[in-house]
Amino acid sequence: MTAPTTAPVPRAELIADTALALLVERGMRGLTHRAVDELAGLPQGSTSNYARTRLALLEATVRRLAEREARVLTLETMPGPSEGVDALVDALARALHLHLSGHRGLLVARYELGLEATRRPELRKFYDAAGRERFREPMIAMMAAAGSREPERHALSLVAWCEGLMFSCAAGAYHSAVPSREELRTGFGELMRGMLGR
């Protein structure tokens, strides 16, 4: 009887995932084409063949980060308005707790890329587009469906609250203390009911 085989990871994914790992381990200065090749166990020049320039490598990394974060946050599976605010609050708390407790590396990589985007306008445009498509627009739609009279402003408040909490727990003063799901549920409940007037 032969052992089951697993499909090989596509090279593009391997390169982008390795780039994310390097950002977490070594920071932006440690992300080079050569370092990706070495860490991924690829022949020298493989990453350059896939992403010729540093900008191309950063764009591929941003794209992969957005894909992986979308799998964790799964905004498309959030409860609909008929299920009530409590169900939405519970789903948000569950998703954020999963992100904080099991995917800290994605957060650290995002902050590295976000800071680099502040210095590179060509990356800023790409970084913003990836976030807008996968997170900002669905969040606005979610707030509108929940009954917000100002869904764009409320989405910004909700994103800012989540971002602040994630930064504090991944790289800030609370990096060693992940809030429980119940604590996150309480925080989301206070925020959502305040915005929705319920």
Image (cartoon, rainbow, N blue to C red):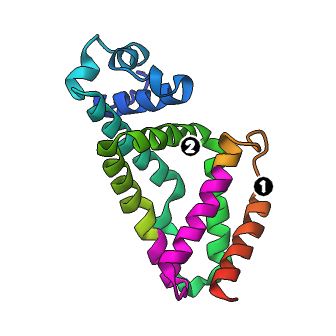
Is 84 included in the stretch rendered in magenta? no
For the C terminus, give its image quadrant: bottom right
On the image, which quarter does residue 3 sit in?
Answer: top left
- The residue to which callout 1 is attached is 180
In this rendering, position of residue 75 left or right of residue 158: left
Q: Identify the residue at horizontal 36%, vertical 29% (top origin).
A: 14
Tell me: residue 144, above or below residue 167: below
Point out which mark residue 141 bears.
Answer: none
Q: Identify the residue at horizontal 64%, vertical 81% (top origin).
A: 195
Name the spot of residue 111 as percent of width and height, x first. 53, 42
Q: Which residues are magenta?
A: 139-166
Q: Identify the residue at horizontal 20%, vertical 22% (top origin).
A: 49
Crowd band around label 2 with a 10 angstrom C-alpha radius: few (<14), some (14–19), many (20+): many
- The residue to which callout 2 is attached is 107
| Disc 1, SS | loop
Q: Return the residue nearer the eye: 85 or 53.
A: 53
Q: Would residue 10 be seen by someone viewing this image from the given angle?
A: no
Gap between marks 1 and 2, in whole Å?
18 Å
Q: Amino acid at mark 2?
A: Leu
